[in-house]
Amino acid sequence: MNNINSFVSGEELLLQERYKNDIRKKIQGRGYKAFVFTLGCQQNEADSERIRGMLKEVGYTITEKEEEADFLLVNTCAIREHAERRALSIIGRFKHYKAKNPDIVIGVCGCMTAQQHRSEQIKHSYHYVDFAFGTSLLYRLPEFINSALEKGKRRFLLDSEKPQIAEGLKIARESSYKAWVSIMYGCNNFCTYCIVPYVRGRERSRNMCDILAEVRDLAGRGYRDITLLGQNVNSYGKDLEGKPTIADLLNEISKIDGDFMIHLMTSHPKDASSEMIDALANNTHATKHFHLPLQSGSDKILKSMNRHYDKARYLSIVDELKSKIKDVTFTTDIIVGFPGETEEDFEETLDIIKRVRFDSIFSFIYSPRKGTPAYDMEQVPEEVKHARYDRLCEIQNEIANEINQTYVGKTIRVLVDGKSKNNENVYTSRTEGNKIVHFESDLDDTGTFINVKITRADTFALYGEKI
Ligand code: 5AD
Ligand code: SF4
C-alpha cells in the first residue's frame, strides 16, 4: 500500500461532487461558456486539461473567445518575472467584462497565486476577481465556482500545508493523439533560483497502478505520444511504499501494447541513474530524445545553484546515454547570469554546449524570484546578462544548424502534428528525437506516423517530402 496521506480523501472528493451538482442546477439551460488561459509549463497545460474536464462536467462549454465567456480563469506561472507580468496584464484586461456583466465569474490559479504576496496583490488590487487558489487546491474548483455563483465571499487561498494528490479528476484532453500523464507533483530540490518548490510543495508520486491504467487507456484509444510529467521524474516513487523507481515504471510501460512514444519531462541530472538509462534504452516505446536541464557549465555556479552535480558528472551521463541509445538527441535548459556568474563561469557553459552539441537549448536570463536564496545574492548587471544570452544563442544556433544538416538525405519516421500555422499545404511533425519536420501534403495525416525524406534543414527545423 502507498502512503494514504498523499491523497485527497474520498469524503473531500465527494463534497466536491455535491458542489458540481449545485453548479449544474444553477447554470442549467443557460448555455454558459468558460474560457481558460494557460501560462507556463506542461504541468500547467496538464492542470488546465483537468480544469476544463471539471468545467465540462458541470455544464460549461469551453470557448476560445474570452469576450463571450461567463467564467474566466487564468492559470498562472511564476517561474520568471515576465510570466507574472503577463498573468497580471491578462487578469487586468478581464476587468471590463465584469463591469459589463456582474454575473461573470473570474478566477485565478496556478503557481503565481500560491505566493502570499501575489495572492494579496490580486485580492486588494483586482476587486473583480472572485477567487484565487494555489496549485494543489485545483480539485476544489467546483466549490469556488459555486460560491462565486452564489455571490458568496471572495476566496483567496494559498496552497494547503501538506499538498495532496487528487486522483480521478476528469481530464478534457486537447489532443486526440498527444497526452500528458502526471506521474508526480511538487519538487524537493530547492535549486536556489527556483520558485517551484515554494508554489508546488514537496514531491508526491502517484501510485504506479493509477499511472499504468492511464497509459493503458490512452494507448488503447490510439494515443501516439505520451509524456510522463513531473518536476523531477527521476525521483519518482521515493515517497511510495516499496519505493518503485522510474526504471520500474518505464519497464512496466514497455509491456503495454500499442504504437506510441514515451517522453520524460523533466529529468534532474543528479538522479539520472544507469538503471533508468537502461530502462529507456530497452524500452519498446521510449523516444530517442532526452531533455536534461544543465543550467550552467560552471562547477562553482552549479554548487551555488544547489544542483548536486558537476560538469564532469553531467558529461558522463550524456556519454552513457549516447553509448546506450543510438541516435539519441539532447535538449537542455540554461540559465544565463545567475548571481556571481563571471566571464570564466559563462565560458564553462559555452564549453559544455560545444562538447555535448545539444539539438536545441531553452536558454533563460536569470530572473530573481522573491523568497528564493538567489534573490538576495549579488546580481549580475542586466546588460551583461543580455550580452551573454546573445552569445550563447549565436553559438547554439550554429551547432543546431550543423546537426540538422546531417539529416539531409535521410528518411525518418515522424508523428504528424497538424497544419503549419503559416502555410496551407504545409504540415508540421516531430521525429522520435523530437525534431521538427515540415513537409507538404494534400492529405491530412495528423496524429499518425509517416516517413519523410529530409531535403533541407536550417537551425530550427528540418524540411522534407512525404514518402
Ligand atoms: N530565472 C530564469 N530561469 C529560471 N528557471 C527556473 N527558475 C528560473 C529563474 N529564476 C528555468 C530553469 C528551469 C526552467 C524550467 O526554467 O532553467 O529548468
Ligand atoms: Fe526548480 Fe530545481 Fe525543482 Fe526543477 S528541480 S522545479 S529547477 S527546484
Image (cartoon, rainbow, N blue to C red):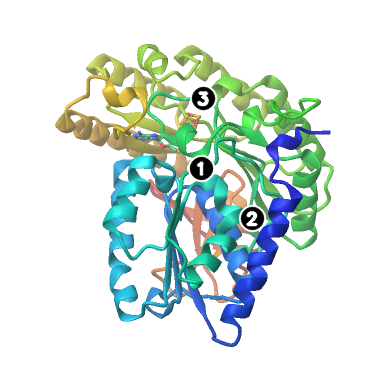
Who comes first in sequence, dot 2 or dot 1? 1
Quadrant position of residue 187: top right
Q: Horizontal placement of 126 versus 380: left or right?
A: right
View extreme (front): residue: 153
Can you tell me whether the CB of the residue at mark 3 lies under 8 Å from the nearest atom of ligand 2?
yes
Query: Which numbered dot is residue 189?
Result: 3
Residue 244 in view: yes
The foreground one among 208 and 297 is 208
How far apart are the alpha carbons under marks 3 and 2?
A: 26 Å
Quadrant observed for ligand 1 in the rendered image: top left
Secondary structure under badge 3?
Answer: loop
Which of discs 1 and 3 lies nearer the camera? The answer is 1
Disc 3 marks a residue whose amino acid type is Asn
Residue drawn 51% across the image and 18% down it? 315
Residue at image mark 1? 159
Q: Residue at x 44, y 25 (%)?
A: 191
